[in-house]
Image: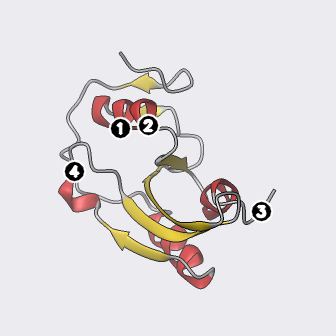
């Protein structure tokens, strides 16, 4: 079922409400770039870590995306729910190890 770029799915539910160590930094950098960022990670399940709202240069409008934050080097360590969401909604969900990953999707950097 998981089809997200060769992810190693851990077959565990997303019940761990601890945040990745880089999550606060990513959220702060996105806020400083003008995005609205909501931490929804405590919800778990198929809800990814951050809800990010901002102007998408390519689409020319405000877009809301869900962001799954992973520590660099751990991007392939996804739960079943995370992998499903990233696979099922590739235009809406973003996997990020740094704020630049999100900024790139919004067309803010090349």
Whether residue 31 sits left or right of residue 48 in the image: it is right
Q: Residue at x 59, y 41 (%)?
A: 73
Question: Which residue position holds label 1?
Answer: 82
- Residue at 36 percent across and 37 percent down: it is 85
Snapshot quadrant of residue 66 = bottom left
Residue name at image x 32 percent, y 33 percent: 79
Nearer mark to the viewer, of 1 and 3 = 3
What is the CA distance from the residue labelled 1 to the residue labelled 3?
25 Å
Q: CA distance from mark 4 to mark 2?
A: 14 Å
User: On the rendered image, what quadrant is the C terminus found in?
Assistant: bottom right
Q: Residues within 10 Å of mark 1 (few under 14, many from 20)?
A: many
Instruction: Tell me which corner region of the image, top left, top right, bottom left or bottom right, holds residue 26.
Output: bottom right
How far is disc 1 from disc 2 in space, using C-alphas?
A: 6 Å
Which of the two marks, 3 or 4, is nearer to us in this view? 3
The residue pinned by badge 4 equals 44
Residue underneath mark 3: 109
Q: Name the quadrant containing residue 106.
A: bottom right
- Vertically, is 55 above or below 78? below
Q: How far from the left and from the top, in percent, is residue 35?
A: 53, 77
Label 3: few (<14), some or many (≥20) within 10 Å? few
- Local SS, label 3: loop
Q: Which secondary structure, mark 4?
A: loop
Residue 84: x and y in percent read 35, 30
Q: CA distance from mark 1 to mark 4?
A: 9 Å
Q: Which residue is mark 2?
A: 86
């Amino acid at each position: 079922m998981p089809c997200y770029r060769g992810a190693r799915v851990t077959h565990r539910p997303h019940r761990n409400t601890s945040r990745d160590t880089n999550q606060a930094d990513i959220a702060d950098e996105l806020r400083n770039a003008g995005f609205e960022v909501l931490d929804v990670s405590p919800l778990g399940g198929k809800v990814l870590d951050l809800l990010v709202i901002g102007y998408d240069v390519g689409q020319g409008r405000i877009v809301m995306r869900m962001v799954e934050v992973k520590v660099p080097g751990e991007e392939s360590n996804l739960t079943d729910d995370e992998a499903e969401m990233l696979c099922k909604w590739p235009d809406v969900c973003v996997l990020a190890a740094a704020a630049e990953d999100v900024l790139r999707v919004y067309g803010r950097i090349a």
